[in-house]
Amino acid sequence: MGKGIALALLSALLGLLVLSIAPGTTEQRPGAGPFMSLAELRPGMEGIGKTVVSGGKISTFKVRIVDVVDNPGELDDHILIRASGEAIERSGGIAAGMSGSPIYVNGKLIGAIWGAASFDVSSEPIALVRPIGTMLQLLEPLRERLAAQPAEPLASAATVVVDGIEFRQASTPVWISGLKGRSSAWLKEGVDSTLLKEGERALLRLGKLEKGFLPSLELGLGRRFDLTFFDLGVPSAIADSDEGSLEPGEAVGAMLAVGDVSIGSFGTLTYREGNLLLSFGHPFLLRGETEMFLTRIKVLDTVQSLMTPFKFGVPGARLGAVLEDRSQGIAGAVGVQPESVALRITVRDGTKGAQSDFEVDVISDPDLLPSLVFSAILNSIDTTINRIGPGTLEVDYSFRGRGLGERVERQDTFYSFSDIAVTAPMQIAEVAYLLAWNDFVDPQLDRLDVEITVDEEVRAYEIIELETDKESYRPGEELNYTVTVKPFREEAKEFHGSITIPEDVEGESLTLHAFGGPRSSDKEKDEEGPKFASLEELIQAIEELGSNNQLTVELLGVSQKSKEKREEEEGIRPSSVQRLERWVVVGEEYKEIKIEQPEQPEEEPQPGPEDRPPEEQEEQGKCKDPSQCDWPS
């Protein structure tokens, strides 16, 4: 980077939703009341900053203004400072988690720390401060939004060069607890594309998953948002929930998930006006209008590091919800519930007899929800069965939402010879994506219940033979079939059923097709997916798509007598479906059968013109003179 020093951005976070604005609250402007504007600042001015270094006590540190950068516009204005004092020395510099720390000159708030130079181990590390004027702009849309729609009560940054030193906003650190192993790694780094595209995805037909869902999981949150992650390795803490004591300088968290799994970023509260809050001085995910969880943070200690010192803490009690996530910071308010999905997971290990229950609340952002759902459910399975290997998995899950009407429910069964835990979470995340991004209404998803049973035994039937009781049939006759399947490491067995040949069947032959799973393999694939006229139609398709434990036998080649009827019944074929409890059905077989069409009676010849009465022949111009016309004897 030449003579410039690479700068690591600090990670702080805040964001909330407000229940009400304190009566009599008036908007404050820089230069008036508790603020000092950028125009009033001069190099050499001294002041203080506030932050928490350890525990819950707010520490102060000294600051000195080095330069004031007034670029065109407002979002690129910066205040360059040097910080010093015991809190800075103990932290090893400006630590991740200090962003949002309020800076005061002459007792007035000038802004919030948002960036610091990497490898700066001097006793007076250099940092950037976001002017308070640009941050206050976040409060006005917050007031308007909350006034228009009262909230529910609680139940890429640019490079900045200053005086020849390059300040670069690096990844915002995100803290994770409760996720282990690959569920954490895949959330951060993305799922391998081979694993994502392995096999045929039946739900892919119901929406453009390949254009949104699959890429989002393949990239992971880290590559999508340029994030740095830290694994806490400790459970969430329960902190004091007294929101009245929350003041500038205290540690707060903006969270994507809370509960048995916690995912989010830590920062320092910059400014509070009644219930409204400001923090960070930089974006978290730059989501604009958003709703995340605001929590307290219990700072255990601040860790020194040559790269970037960081606060080590754990999320505590909820305080509210994030509403704004913009380039100049995070804004929100205390005392309200953000839109979220309550994820409740029960996993039973049928082999060991163990059971685990998990409770995680995740934000309802449709772009992030599938990834959060996938990681949380995968983690619950891996944690319960404590292995990666073969087996059979049965799942029963349902979505609820205020915009859905009735619950959306599905049951399915999966098997694997190598890794039984992945496919079910993937399907549930797919349904979450389809519902969240449906073309019709906001589903307002608020709950997802998942029940899973996993066994080490591989229970899979492979179709090996299809036979019928006869070789030919008449229209309207009953066809009896036998499907022979080979269970894994067991003797073959048979399943029987019947199908009625349609009365209006045409042609001399039909094809009988037996297959396992949710779809007919010969049906044409529509790259754009099917068309739905309403959310109700999409939900019906999700629920009726069929499951992997389904044995289907259908007649192919059945045509209709009229174009109108074919259009009305497009895709509907005479079929027989059997659900085989606790077993997955794979493979397919075809058999051609003959159709004995009834003999058609000979048609009587129609009279020709010469057989008509003379008057009719004359009218048709066949005979001008009736006396000369032929007349049948």
Image (cartoon, rainbow, N blue to C red):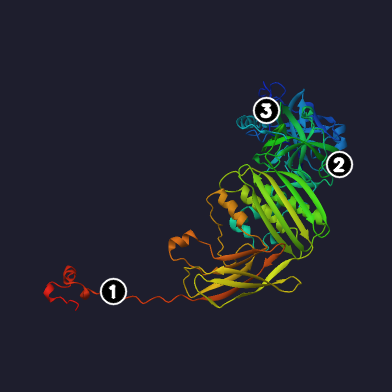
Q: Report how far apart the C-alphas of labels 2 and 1 lie in the structure.
A: 105 Å
Amino acid type, mark 2: Gln
Q: Earlier in the sequence, mark 2 or mark 1?
A: 2
Q: Report how far apart the C-alphas of labels 1 and 3 lie in the structure.
A: 89 Å
Position above or below: 387 against 37? below
Horizontal arrangement in the rendering, residue 583 relative to residue 437 (left or right)? right
Evaluate if marks 2 and 3 touch, with contact meaning CB atoms under 8 Å apart.
no
Q: Nearer the viewer, residue 30 or 160?
A: 30
Evaluate if marks 2 and 1 touch, with contact meaning CB atoms under 8 Å apart.
no
> Which quarter of the image is occupied by the C terminus?
bottom left
Please give the name of the residue rendered at 67% of the width and 28% of the height, measured from the top-left corner. 20
Amino acid type, mark 1: Gln
Q: Earlier in the sequence, mark 1 or mark 3?
A: 3
Q: Nearer the viewer, residue 612 or 428?
A: 612
Q: Nearer the viewer, residue 75 or 224?
A: 224
Amino acid type, mark 3: Ser
Quadrant of residue 172 in the image? top right
- Category of crowding for the residue at label 3, using alpha-carbon neighbours closer than 10 angstroms: few (below 14), some (14–19), many (at least 20): some
- Category of crowding for the residue at label 1, using alpha-carbon neighbours closer than 10 angstroms: few (below 14), some (14–19), many (at least 20): few
Horizontal arrangement in the rendering, residue 257 relative to residue 545 (left or right)? right
Residue 20, label in figure: 3
Looking at the rendered structure, the secondary structure element under dot 3 is loop
Which mark lies nearer to you, 2 or 1? 1
Looking at the rendered structure, the secondary structure element under dot 1 is loop
Looking at the rendered structure, the secondary structure element under dot 2 is loop
Position of residue 300 measured from the top left corner of the image (x, y, whole percent): 86, 38
The residue to which callout 1 is attached is: 606
Position of residue 144 measured from the top left corner of the image (x, y, whole percent): 61, 30
Which mark lies nearer to you, 1 or 3? 1
Residue 207 in view here: no
The residue to which callout 2 is attached is: 304
Quadrant of residue 456 in the image? bottom right
